[in-house]
Amino acid sequence: MSIIKYGFGALLLLTLLLLPLPRHVSADSQTGAVQGKLDLSQIDLARDTVKLTGEWELYWSALLEPADIDAYGNSRIPMQYVKVPHVWGARGAYPALNEGAATYRLRIHLGDEVSHAVHALYIPAVATSYKLWINGELKASNGTVGLTRETMKPKNYAKVVYFHPDATDLELVVQVSNFVQRKGGMWAPLSIGEASSITRHRENRMASDMFISSALIILGLYHVGLWFFRKKDKLVVLIGCASLFFALRSLLLGETLLVRFVPQLDWSAAVKLEYLSPNAGILLFALFVRHLYPRETSRIAIAAIFACCSVFCLLALLFEPRIFTYSMVPFQIVIITAFVYILFIYALAIKRRREGALLSGISACLMFAAAMNDILFYNQLVSSINLAPFGVFLFLFSQTMIVAKRFTGAHAKVEEIGAELLQVNMQLENTISERTAELRLTNEHLLKKNEELRQAEESRRQLVSNISHELGTPMTAIQGYVKAIMDGIIEPTENKYWNTIYDKVLYVNRLVKDLFQLSRLEAKQFKFDFEAMSADDLIELHLRKWEWDVRARNVRFTVKRTPPEGGWDDAYVMIDSVRIDQVITNIVYNALKFTPAGGAIEVECGQTGNELLIRVSDTGTGIDEKSLPYVFDRFYKGNSDGGLQEGTGLGLAIAKEIVLAHGGRIWAESKRNEGSSFYFTLPLVVLQEAFP
């Protein structure tokens, strides 16, 4: 419980710090404007914002422009001095009607010297449409002013107007019209100051409204989310929905952020939402208290609160603002009565030591105090700010802490029961875990062996199939020569037939060896001995070794190196040197077979991306486009039209498997009678990876 108290106290302090407390001063410290004139020559507007309170000139039932009023306030319409802020139709105030149109004027003396700083005027709320002139220049408007209900268009949200004073005196002329709600006129004072001061004041108010609205929305969604996962708990959904309604109201008060975010929102719809949200919020709050403390609550009293709030909601839904806004005062009486009764319920709950009653009671008192402040403020009885959203937030946060404590307690109980069950079933779970682990290991071992057997069987099948296919021709030839010698058709002393038989035996031996190696490579059963080797050493060790053999056949041989930007010193590859030598041997030997005397073979090394690229080009017979995709397939030798007639047809297939095992790529480019180019790549590694 102490954690909840400390958390609530910290939140209360944070909320107080976030309250909009801009510095204001009143002109002349006490009186404000006198007979339509305000002297601000002694006020530092760069530091302070000044509320334009006091006596303004008022021209009732007229919408006058600055040119219609002379310097002494004379016009065709009679003038009266009225205290601003004020509400039309208030008891004992002028004018006596709450609907109509009027023009306000105030003259301000800024000092003896013209200030070149940008000034600003903050207009919080004018009911319900207005136009503003500063020194004869139209600076702002909200809605459309008119002398009748049909000609005016209501709009009401806070604005800031920036201007450059062109003289030491200012003249403010404001046209105001209201035919759509109970409260008309300049019921909130305008503020003036330099732009930085007014902007800071506006930003503080917007930050405060944004903070409290966002907090209420988050709390509301949090509680609704809890209810979604546990629909038996009606308390959380009631408090969550109430939080969302109060968040909506906070977006429609003060800086009217909802109107700023959704400028297309109709004024009438905004007012309906402004009146519906507290009605629905109080209704849900009463139901919440009823479910929270059913033994302390009277069902009749809660039903009465429910009925009153429902009536006010229906009024807001069914009628226009000029009708249902008159329900505000009766609704405020209902709010006060409901809060007094709810505080009585909390007092009973605290007395009977209900869980969380003390914290809820304290937060409910703070919320009631904030609500009373707003009721007095909006009825022009006190000078204050809008505090109800902060009070609601404190109450909802306290309920969140209580819900969190409840869930924590439930979770602790579940953990306790779980620990007991764990102790009872420990031996069984251990046995099951051991058996499961053994079965898993056995299963993994069987799967691995099965895969190895499958690959071995596939390799064996292909090996047998390939051997039976490829050995048919040479074995038939050997059998024919031997049979001819045995039958006396060929003399045993003729060496050329024995040489032919010997060559066929060598071919078969090489074929079997290549097939065996290729099968192991494809079955991933071949072991590679990787080691780090610099690209420079690779070139010298495996490429230049062919230089004399190639030139001995009267074929030009060149090695071209294109070093990377950092040079060959930091270029390393991880390779099995013997196998890479086999790849290069197969490719170079293949090029040498099909390159006639006088031709050329060129080996080029370079870098592409993060790979070492090796290209072997020849000027031989080449390969046509139809045969090129199959040159790396096993036993592919092509034909007389496509090239690649000699050999077993396994060398390039073996080279491909070795390069792929190194993480590289291999491909060929060629055209018939224009030579061929074979490429393969090896991944480059940095020096630290090569020698960790």
Image: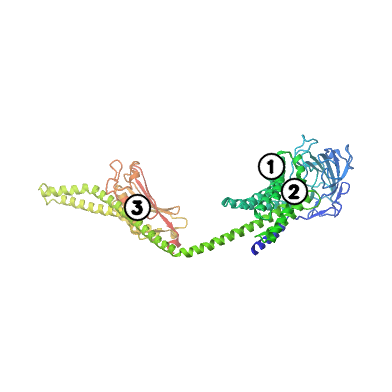
Could you tell me which secondary element the residue under label 1 belongs to? Answer: loop
Residue of label 1: 263
Q: How far apart are labels 3 and 2 at the CA level?
A: 87 Å
Classify mark 2: helix, strand or loop: helix
- Label 1 and label 3: CA atoms lie apart by 68 Å
Viewer-side residue, 250 vs 337: 337
Name the one closer to the observer, 114 or 162.
Answer: 162
Inspect the image, locate mark 2, and give the three-letter code of the amino acid beneath it: Val
Residue furthest top as drawn? 150
Q: Amino acid at mark 3?
A: Glu
- Mark 3 and mark 2 lie on one chain; the one further toward the N terminus is 2
> Which kind of residue does numbered mark 1 sit on?
Pro
Give the mark toward the camera: 3 or 2: 2
Q: Nearer the viewer, mark 1 or mark 3?
A: 1
Q: Which numbered disc covers residue 334?
A: 2
- Residue toward you, 563 or 427: 427
Mark 2 and mark 1: Cα distance apart in space: 33 Å
Please give left or right for residue 171 compared with residue 602 in the image: right
Specify whether 453 is left or right of 16.
Answer: left
Q: Which residue is mark 3?
A: 657
